[in-house]
């Protein structure tokens, strides 16, 4: 509320404070992760497995290195927009090579969904 200027009676607030923060992929992934911890993974079954880098780097490397099943993951830089800087990986080697060219390690990595549920 301290960010909200003094509003007179009968005034309208045209947006919810903090909503733009949810549009940031890193912040949104952190919120989903917190909610998942509260209500369990079943409630968020529609949301792909997600790692926020560099916080979850060790966990992501373990998954990518396991090699049990070759899956595709999509890595989206936190500072990118409109598809800029997005790349796909299928293993730890792919990840290490592609991240070595980036100066900023902040990114969101998700299991790639080939046929996502789209709302029309």
Image (cartoon, grey):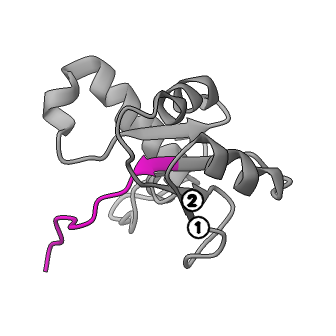
Task: Specify whether 103 is left or right of 11.
Answer: right
Q: Residue at x 49, y 52 (%)?
A: 90
Residue 79: in magenta span: no
Residue at figure coordinates x 17%, y 40% from the top left = 45
Residue located 14% across and 33% down the image: 43
- Residue 78 lies left or right of residue 27; in this view the side is right
Q: Is residue 53 above or below residue 36?
A: below
Percent position of residue 19, x then y: 43, 55
Highlighted magenta segment, given as a residue range: 109-120
Q: Nearer the viewer, residue 103 or 89?
A: 89
For disc 2, the neighbor class at 10 Å (few under 14, some 14 to 19, many from 20) is many
**Category of crowding for the residue at label 1, using alpha-carbon neighbours closer than 10 angstroms: few (below 14), some (14–19), many (at least 20):** some
Hey, which quadrant is residue 2 in on the image? top right
Residue 116 covered by magenta stretch: yes
Among the 4 quarters of the image, the one containing residue 49: top left
Q: Give residue 76's mark.
A: 2
Mark closest to the chain's N terminus, 1 or 2: 2
Local SS, label 2? strand
Residue toward you, 51 or 62: 62
Work out whether residue 24 or residue 4 is closer to the camera in this orientation and state it: 24
Compared with 98, 119 (above or below) is below
Marks 1 and 2, how far apart at CA:
5 Å
Q: Are marks 1 and 2 in contact (CB under 8 Å)?
A: yes
Residue 73 appears in the rendering: yes
């Amino acid at each position: 509320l301290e960010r909200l200027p003094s509003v007179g009676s009968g005034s309208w607030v045209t947006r919810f404070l903090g909503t733009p923060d949810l549009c940031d992929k890193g912040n949104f992934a952190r919120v989903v992760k917190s909610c998942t911890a509260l209500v369990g993974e079943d409630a968020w079954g529609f949301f792909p497995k997600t790692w926020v880098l560099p916080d979850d780097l060790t966990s992501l490397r373990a998954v990518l290195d396991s090699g049990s099943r070759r899956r595709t993951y999509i890595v989206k830089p936190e500072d990118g927009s409109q598809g800029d800087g997005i790349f796909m990986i299928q293993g730890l080697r792919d990840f290490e090579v592609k991240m070595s060219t980036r100066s900023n390690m902040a990114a969101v990595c998700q299991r790639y969904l080939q046929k996502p549920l789209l709302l029309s």
